[in-house]
Image (cartoon, helix red, strand yellow):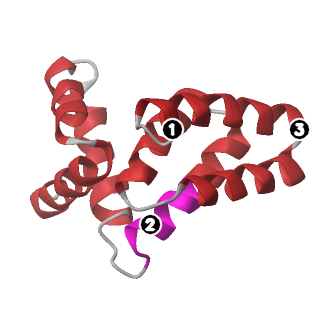
Amino acid sequence: MDDTLFKTGLEQRKATLGAEYVEKNLAAADDFTRPFQEAMTAWCWGFGWGDETIDPKTRSMMNLTMIGALGKMHEWEIHCKGALNNGVSKQEIRAIVHVIGIYCGVPQALECFRVARKVLTEAGEL
């Protein structure tokens, strides 16, 4: 594994998802899951998020759209929190959910709104 990508990824991951969340995930990794955690940190967060061509706010908005389209709601919740950390507003989250509803269907938009409401309430935005 590229140590530079891992270090960059760790910084990006903590900046978006929060240091406590990331450290908890890494500490919970065992011999079975640690290689994936390390590779994901280097590849997704170091290579992907470490590319400064797209700023973190835009990348968070893209991620919410893609993860919402896939219906991966546990990850959507995590990235919704991260999007707030990266400066995505409540209004922008709502607009993203509207797009998800248009292209992926009303039931998926309703799921996204349900999770967004929880995240925004916890963040004091609602």
Quote the CA–CA distance across marks 3 and 1: 20 Å
Question: Which comes sooner in the sequence, label 1 or label 2?
Answer: 2
Which residue is under mark 3?
Answer: 106
For residue 22, what is the image quadrant? top left
Magenta span contains residue 59:
yes
Q: Amino acid at mark 1?
A: Leu
Q: Is residue 30 visible?
A: no
For residue 92, what is the image quadrant? bottom right
The span shown in magenta is 54-63
Which residue is under mark 1?
Answer: 120
124, 58: nearer the viewer: 124
SS category of the residue bearing label 2: helix
Question: Which comes sooner in the sequence, label 3 or label 2?
Answer: 2
Front label number (3 vs 1): 1
Q: Residue 12: horizontal and vertical position, in percent?
A: 25, 57
Q: Main secondary structure of the magenta part?
A: helix
Which residue is under mark 2?
Answer: 57
Residue at the image point whose x is 31% and y is 34% from the top:
36
Label 1 with label 2: CB-CB less than 8 Å: no
Q: Is residue 97 above or below residue 116?
A: below
Q: Residue 7: horizontal and vertical position, in percent?
A: 12, 56
Q: Residue 47: horizontal and vertical position, in percent?
A: 32, 64
Q: Residue 53: horizontal and vertical position, in percent?
A: 40, 82
> Does 73 sit left or right of 123 as displayed?
right
